[in-house]
Image (cartoon, rainbow, N blue to C red):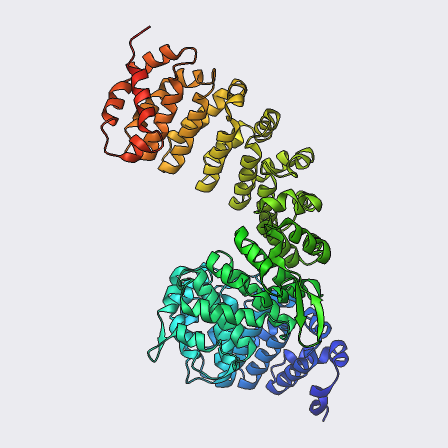
Amino acid sequence: MLSDVRPFMTFMDVEHSRSYIDDLYSSDPDKCLTSLICIKNSVIGSNRQKESVIAQGIVPRLIQLLKDRNRKAAIRLESVVTIGSLAKGTGEHVELLINCGTVPLLLDLLEENDPLLIDACLCCLRTLSQQDTGRFQTVYSHRHLQKLLSFAEPEENILRQSCVASILSSLCKGASEQNALRLAGAAQVLTNMLSICHTAVRVPTLTCLAAMAFENRAVAEEITNTSYKDTKVITILARLLSRDKPIDMQLEAARCLTNLHRAGAIMAYDAVITFRTLPCLVRLCQIEHSTPHRAAAANTLAYLTEVDSELQQTTAISNQLIGALADSLLNSNNVLARQAAFSAYASLAANDEDIRKRLIETNRLLIGWDGESGQHRHVRAFASLGANDEDIRKRIIETNRLMERVVDGLGDPNEGVRLAAIRCLHSLSRSVQQLRTTFQDHSVWRPLMALLTGSPPLELLSAASSTLCNLLLEFSPAKEPMLQQGAVQLLATLTTRNEPALRLNGVWALMNLAFQAEQRVKSQILTALGTDQIFRLLADSDTRILMKTLGLLRNLVSPRAHTDAMMTLHGPQVMQAVVLVLEGPHSPDVKEQALCILTNIADGERAKDHIMANDDVLKKLTDYMTHPSTRLQIAAIYCITNLIRQEEPGAAERQLRLREMGVVNILNQLSTTPDNLLYEGKNGAGAFSRILSHCCKSDP
């Protein structure tokens, strides 16, 4: 019979034969099933075939068949398998399936009692979740999460456990998903799954635990407090770092422990971090391992050591690691390897000069021996770039062209490599020597400026603008050419962005630029920002942005040689900004910065008139002299000190005015304070006495 051979016909037969499509809609279950099997076979392994079948509008019919509980079990099963095959196509195919409501349907089908259907639905969900790169948002309800976790218990089969772990790890894209999994009891279920001695289960389970713990302290702490048969999960994870375990398992266990540490659930000095996780990652970075494994290990190592100086020190003394990272960067064409090497180097380069020097002096750092080939080779010593010894640093850079590779990374077609290269430069830019020599030699500011003037992704723009902050410090040779290329306007534009990180970097860089800058530069900054934007920054909900804006204003009205000129041009706006902060519901840290601006203004010969003419500001100064916060009292007294300096014109009038406002009485009260910081700390007892004596003088 013809129907007997239909399932084995080629895709071209299905593509051009309307009868097979018609059979899919037939009321005859046998015809419908035969059509399904034929379509399923035709789409396996070819995106072009999937595209053609989807274009014929078959997906809604597959979903309809799947929903119909009155259909033969075989029809529903073949429908799920076909959808799973289509899900292995392109991103557009996945998008269509998700938009058709496939995921909620598959989750609901898990409530049925057909084991084969459940297995097929789990496999299909795993495929969809792995293909979904974050473009789509699929919300799993608490009921669905608990149902999925019920298939992950140790008594379930390996296929289901593996599927559930993969689905949940792909699902875990942010804090909301992490918290939802925690509430559903995922920590305990996943810990139990680590007892299953099967790589297909353990690896995705470790991946899921790592995703749950990433930058989420509450979830990370719950995971660390979870046990399986009285064995803490930390102990289980440490065992999975052993050399006898598969490399993928070691990597995922190390990543899980790393994320638990970075989330604050495990301390850096814990033995499982210093003596198990760190050595494991260093070992997996070595050249005997495959490039993908080395890249994954280097990326995790970079994240593990990124913020802790002791871990950085421990890592830095491993000359084998330095050589292995250098080999990945300079001798590998693999994008992931280059990106990982840049990232690891960025973490190591964040150390102090002593650590960099130790890296230079480490045995076999400059010349290494390759035991496999028996040939001498140069080892590119990443962290040597920041060493104290200029001759050694210069010799390594010139010989191995490492900085050229880093700069070249800024133009790499791969976004991940560009981002890692920028982060590497950011770490290097913390060194004064680097800014004055290597960065200048390679004109690093040019590609960074070019990148910022384009339309890079947010993460890349944030990293580049962070590096720019350091390039604009007063001792950086790049400062002047960057000014000529429009850096001020570029940074002022950043302060208007919706993203807090970019606003912060923009105002931070302007603050650095204003420090000890020429008056023309300061005027240029104020003109580019404008009064309205300064007020918007001062009202920003992000305290860091507010603090850097106050730091910018503080730099604009100092040193004393610039104070009068700046206040003559912009006095009313600056005073209004200070009052805005002093009257706002801000912390003592913030208000202290505002008082410091007033202190700088009071240091000017004519600028102090802006304070003396403002009764409201004077009243605030006297109020802060008796504030519960000692630091605010000190800041207010500093300002009073500058206002009443005896040797300056108008001192007598200012002293009289302050006496009338009760400053003398306040000072008399403060002179008996038991607070050593207030009386003897920043001001000193002698200075305190002079303030009191000046204010107590009789009228001239």
* Left or right: 34, with 692 as reference point: right
Residue lying at 55% horizontally and 30% vertically, measured from the top left: 516
Q: Which residue is more in the foreground, 598 or 367?
A: 367
Residue lying at 41% horizontally and 10% vertically, measured from the top left: 650
Q: Quadrant of the N terminus?
A: bottom right
Q: From what the image shows, is residue 538 above or below residue 125?
A: above
Q: From what the image shows, is residue 629 above or below residue 558?
A: below
Farthest residue toward the bottom? 1
Figure quadrant of residue 642 = top left
Residue 458 visible in image: no
x and y, in percent, of residue 106 in the image: 51, 74
Count the marks.
Answer: 0
Q: From what the image shows, is residue 217 above or below residue 82?
A: above
Residue 200 visible in image: yes
Figure quadrant of residue 621 = top left
Residue lying at 77% horizontally and 77% vertically, measured from the top left: 16
Figure quadrant of residue 503 = top right
Residue lying at 54% horizontally and 19% vertically, measured from the top left: 565
x and y, in percent, of residue 471 in the image: 61, 42
Q: Which residue is more in the foreground, 412 or 633?
A: 633
x and y, in percent, of residue 510 in the image: 56, 35
x and y, in percent, of residue 69 in the image: 50, 80
Q: Quadrant of the C terminus?
A: top left
